[in-house]
């Protein structure tokens, strides 16, 4: 990038201060730093969340998962958000379903710190825990969960270098899952059924070419692939019988 578009300049002007001059912000953007990291915030559904290099910038596709989830469940009592990052899905779901108990986990200490800041910023009381997928969840909710959402890392190690430059600013742990890209999805698929109550729903974001292989990862559940607003395969959805 050699110049920045006018609409980005306007946004950077709004962030500039005496101790953070516009020229410095433009230089950061020209080096490829995502606009939202420079601004320090990103919109997600009804919320405006803090973001920085410790977390993935929440995406429109994930807002699509939030919308899908709110259409699929009525009055959930227990919600789990795996791989919560900035806390986007957990906090948006808590704001939509205030009486639900919302549990969110992330393996990254940095991400849990940002999610904790966002919990404070929004005043939404969700349970946040650092650890691997379901491990930090209280066993008392086994078999009781109404809704599991997850936007896991799903890029294959070999594909990381070909991601767009601004995406490579984001944490690798948020993007890369392992040699095939399916590793984390497969582990979610293997355990989701035991945490759901009968009739409970799991929705997992996937890469657009992962529909067939990701569906077979949810072996204990009748999983289907759903598309995003642009028609790409982006979500695995399953309801526990
Ligand atoms: C694609 S980001 C999604 C963040 C957020 N849910 C969103 O949609 O904006 C994936 C997140 O998963 C976390 N993560 C990666 N491996 C994990 C694991 N085994 N258990 C829990 N979290 C994990 C990363 O730290 C990162 O925050």
Image: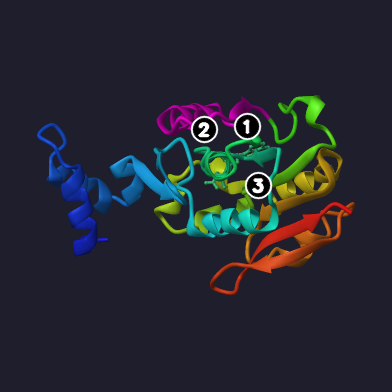
Quickly name the residue at label 3.
Answer: 150
Determine the quadrant in which ligand 1 lies: top right
Which residue is pictured at 80% across the width and 44% down the height?
192
Image quadrant in which you'd find residue 104: top right
Q: Is residue 147 magenta?
A: no
Quickly name the residue at label 1.
Answer: 107
Neighbor class of circle 1 (other Cα within 10 Å; few <14, some 14-19, many 20+) is: many
Q: Quadrant of the N terminus?
A: bottom left
Q: Is residue 23 left or right of residue 200?
A: left
Q: Is mark 1 within 8 Å of ligand 1?
A: yes
Work out how far the residue at label 2 is from the one at label 3, CA to CA, in angstroms. 15 Å
The answer to whether marks 1 and 2 mark residues whose Cβ atoms lie closer than 8 Å is yes
Q: Earlier in the sequence, mark 1 or mark 3?
A: 1
Q: Earlier in the sequence, mark 2 or mark 3?
A: 2
| Label 2 secondary element | helix
Q: Is mark 2 within 8 Å of ligand 1?
A: yes
């Amino acid at each position: 990038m050699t110049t920045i578009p006018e609409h980005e300049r306007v946004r950077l002007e709004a962030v500039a201060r005496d101790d953070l001059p516009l020229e410095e912000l433009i230089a950061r953007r020209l080096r490829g730093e995502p606009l939202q990291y420079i601004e320090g915030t990103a919109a997600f559904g009804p919320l405006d969340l803090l973001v920085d290099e410790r977390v993935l910038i929440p995406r429109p596709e994930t807002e699509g998962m939030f919308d899908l989830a709110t259409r699929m469940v009525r009055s959930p009592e227990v919600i789990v958000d795996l791989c919560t990052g900035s806390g986007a899905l957990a906090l948006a779901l808590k704001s939509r379903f205030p009486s639900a108990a919302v549990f969110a986990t992330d393996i990254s200490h940095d991400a849990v710190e940002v999610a904790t800041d966002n919990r404070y910023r929004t005043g939404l009381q969700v349970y946040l825990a650092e650890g691997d997928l379901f491990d930090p969840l209280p066993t008392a909710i086994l078999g009781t969960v109404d809704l599991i959402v997850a936007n896991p890392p799903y890029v294959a190690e070999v594909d990381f270098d070909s991601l767009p430059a601004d995406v490579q600013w984001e944490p690798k742990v948020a993007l890369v899952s392992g040699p095939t890209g399916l590793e984390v999805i497969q582990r979610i698929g293997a355990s989701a059924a035991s945490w759901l109550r009968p009739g409970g729903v799991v929705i997992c974001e996937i890469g657009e070419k992962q529909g067939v292989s990701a569906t077979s990862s949810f072996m204990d559940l009748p999983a289907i692939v759903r598309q995003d607003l642009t028609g790409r395969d982006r979500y695995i959805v399953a309801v526990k019988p």
